Amino acid sequence: MTSIDPINTFSPHTALVVDDELANRKVLSKFLSKLGFKVLEAENGAKAIEVFQNEEIDIILMDVMMPEVDGIEATIKIKSLCVDDLVPIIFLTALTSDEEMAKCIDAGGDDFISKPFKLNVLKAKIHSLDRIRSFYLQAKEANRKLELGDKIAKSVFNEAIFKKNIDIDDVQHWVHAKDSFNNQIFLISRTPSNGINLLLGHINAQGLASAVGALPSSEVFRAMSHKGFAPNEILSAINSKLNTLLPDDMNLSAVFIHIDSELQQAFIFNCNLPDVLILDSENHKIVNKISSLNYALGSKKKFTFDDKLAQTSINVSNVIVFNSISISQQSRLLDYDDICLKGSKSGSILSHLKDSYATQLDSETNFDNFTVVELPIIKSLIPESDELKQGINAKASNPLNYQKPTFDNQVNFVLSIRGRKLESVDPVPQLLNYLQSVADISAHQEALFTILTELYVNALDHGVLGLESSLKKSADGFMKYFELKKERLETLNDGFVNINLTLETNNITNQLVITVSDSGNGFDISKMNLEISDELLFSGRGMALINGLCDSIDVTPPGNEVIATYRWCAE
């Protein structure tokens, strides 16, 4: 052996020296100590196994020829105890034959050096194996973190996202997942007006990284849907949240659909996903396609969704089919539109898609995860609200209607919207949020949403903008109505809508007095329809709904101020 003065370049590790000769053990122990190792010794293979089982060992220098248990047997046993850890073993041997060297390697030895050896060569071998073990441990830790990230992500998706969806049996979806973790986002929520919001998409990332974008997106979606925000406002908020949280190369490709039961309309945004298909299940044809806007949510810091909305009429024979397949990958799935049409004839589009693509998806393993949703427009999808049905007959059944209570407590809130702000501000969600902060309105949110929405829309549309409700007597007229509304809002420079909320309470009754006034010329009160009928499908329902839900409604001449009173029992 050659004596050298080794440089301490090793991080603190524990080495095990196994040799039946005491002199050899002492020389190697001194050498390893100078390299920075804590050193343990064993005089034979049996003792080496015992030490390994009781200590954390990072590297082993193993003699081959020893009594009781030799180095080959000890190495085989120690390597079996390592499981998924890497503990390098360097054989120190006087044997030089290829056969004996092969035995050392087959037993699990990572390197060997022939006696007598030079310490600088041994140091180089130790350094090399130490570096390899360091890389191994880093990879093992990275894999552990990746597995932990996937576990957390699965929990986030399963517990915090999917389990919060409302359960609608008629909405079917098919998930194709190439691995156990599926990073697809599929959200369903009802709105206070008893509509439905759906969002399907995927973050262009895997594991925990995808959950970082999916969780806040789902929370924004649910909170704003629950409060009655418009689809463009929800998407703007999601877009802003993702821009704040995600790096530039991460975004959310998604389809957002709002189903309005009263208007029999679907409002659709397609952000960087394949065409949304609207099929006629009776005539088996595609009646509409909603193409991609060619950008994903979070890809632009500021974007207005107001003019990107696809609005289409729907009826009970329609089926909406949409998916989260990347556009490039869908082009590889041949005849997608045709397969959907054939599926509509068989009564199950998803089953037909799965059967048609089974062979291709099994043979081509590089398809990303995706989800396909089949949304039939049937009456059970959007049931009538029990609360609204009960509200129509409230005056005949609610004893509060005929009381004249006095109130001990009062809160007043005033909101005024003027000029160009009438184009962009939707006050109803903010008003509901305010009311929830001062009283528990959870059981009455749907009714209050309807009342506030109808009062505000009447004031803005018919008062400030001078639109005629009669335009909405047909589906075509309905579209014309909204085109005129958009045009007049874009050129609006003056006008106002004032909203005054007065909440009064005592130990028996809660009373909300809603006063809405506008800058319009008013309307002929004698023509106001306060009774719900089947004839009022598209127009004229507003004041009738308010009258059915409220305990009283008064219109101040010349018709540009409405005072509605809504009461409910105190808990």
Image (cartoon, rainbow, N blue to C red):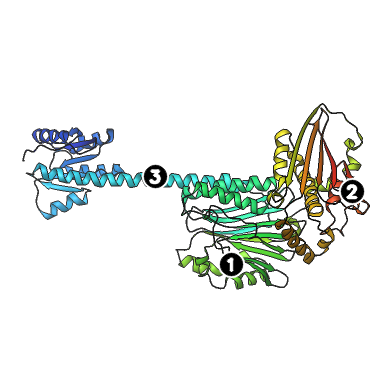
Provide residue 407's location: percent of width, then percent of height.
84, 28
Q: Is residue 538 left or right of residue 201?
A: right
**Which labelled disc corresponds to residue 144?**
3
**Which labelled disc corresponds to residue 437?**
none
Q: Is residue 138 visible?
A: yes
Residue type, numbered disc 3: Arg
Q: Is residue 190 visible?
A: no
Q: Which residue is mark 1?
A: 353
Residue type, numbered disc 1: Leu
Quarter of image, res 414: top right
Looking at the image, the residue that sits furthest to the right is 526
- Secondary structure state at the residue bearing disc 1: helix
Quadrant of image for the C terminus: top right
Spatial CA distance of label 1 from label 3 is 37 Å
Residue type, numbered disc 2: Pro
Quarter of image, res 469: bottom right
User: Mark 2 packing: few (<14 Cα in 10 Å), some, or many (20+)?
Assistant: few
Q: Which residue is mark 2?
A: 558
Tag 3 near tag 2, CB within 8 Å: no
Tag 1 near tag 2, CB within 8 Å: no
Q: Earlier in the sequence, mark 1 or mark 2?
A: 1
Spatial CA distance of label 3 from label 2 is 72 Å
